[in-house]
Amino acid sequence: MTDESTPWGTGLTVAGFVAAVTAAAVVVLSLGLIRVHPLLAIGLNLVAVGGLAPTVWGWRKLPVWRWFVLGAGVGVAGGWLALLAITLGN
């Protein structure tokens, strides 16, 4: 392995863990907010993602942080899909 190679195995593992933690956090926090008011949950999710997106987007070119960016993006999308499935299922 040369210094220029990409550590796909380690990187995808890190991205997977970040995605799982992020998705769980989005679902748990959003379910708590939905109990207060559904529009509050939607609004705070959009504000949080919109506020963090420019910072996280800048990290995508850094060698180690790009895996966290991938995991965070997949985690937020997966959390929103899981939240949608949970709320529509009830």
Image: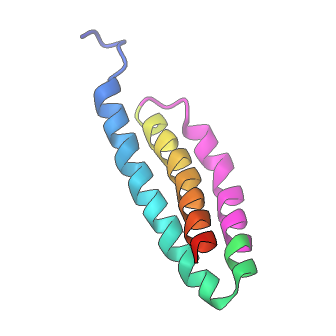
- Residue at x-position 55% and y-position 78%: 31
Magenta region includes residue 45: yes
Q: Quadrant of residue 11?
A: top left
Residue 36 x, y percent position in the rendering: 64, 90
Q: Position of residue 52 (x, y in %)?
A: 63, 55
Against 5, residue 21 (above or below) is below
- Of the pair 55 and 40, the residue shown nearer to us: 40
| x 44%, y 37%: residue | 67
> Quick one: 7 or 80, which is closer to the camera?
80
Looking at the image, the residue that sits furthest to the bottom is 36
Q: Which residues are magenta?
A: 43-63
**Residue 16, image x and y in percent?**
37, 44
- As for residue 10 lying within the magenta part, the answer is no
- Is residue 43 found left or right of 55 in the rendered image? right
Q: To which quarter of the image does residue 61 belong? A: top right
**What's the image's color scheme?**
rainbow
